[in-house]
Image (cartoon, grey):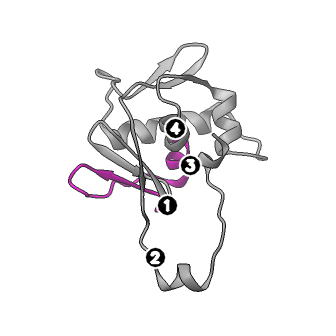
Amino acid sequence: MSEEFEFAGFRLDLSARLLLRRDGAPVKLNSRAFDTLAVLVARPGETLTKRLLLNAVWPHVVVGDNNLNQAIAAIRKALGDTDATRRIVQTVPGRGFCFTADVTKRDAVAPLSSHAVTQREVVPTVADFF
């Protein structure tokens, strides 16, 4: 099974680590921005503190708020979430960030590849922690 989330004309496929537009076109997003988006999408409507996001996306690494701010900026740019609208990721001053778009969670059956049949590997993702 792979976990997918649909929101605001996008689909986030956690197992394939892909962000796709409604038409199936991939959207470029660096790995830390992808992980940040995965944490936000998994908990829509909740205000997530900067500390929680930093610990989830950069575990066991000392980073500052600027790293998180860059990831949020990359997410907003990829989703077309402009300063004027802020319809998807909102900043909650003094508290953190909130994913405000409606989210539909889908469990999709992942196709088996010869690699998956011969070798099974468990790779934890950010979503495993939520």
The three-letter amino acid code for the residue at tag 3 is Arg
Could you classify mark 3 by the number of other residues whose Cα lies within 10 Å: few (under 14), some (14-19), or many (20 or more)?
A: some
Which span of residues is magenta-colored? Answer: 16-36
Q: Does 17 sit left or right of 55 as displayed?
A: left
Residue farthest left in this picture: 23
The residue under label 4 is 42
- Mark pair 3, 4: CA separation: 15 Å
- Mark pair 3, 1: CA separation: 23 Å
The residue under label 3 is 32
Tell me which numbered mark, 3 or 4, is placed earlier along the sequence.
3
- Give the vertical position of 117 relative to 25 (above or below): below
Could you classify mark 1 by the number of other residues whose Cα lies within 10 Å: few (under 14), some (14-19), or many (20 or more)?
A: few
Quarter-wise, where is residue 116 in the image?
Answer: bottom right
Residue at (63, 76) in percent of width and height? 120
The three-letter amino acid code for the residue at tag 2 is Leu
- Mark pair 4, 1: CA separation: 16 Å
- Mark pair 4, 2: CA separation: 25 Å
Which mark's residue is nearer the viewer, 2 or 3? 2
Q: Which mark is residue 1?
A: 1
Q: Determine the secondary structure under disc 3.
A: helix
Which mark's residue is nearer the viewer, 4 or 2? 2
Tell me which numbered mark, 4 or 2, is placed earlier along the sequence.
4
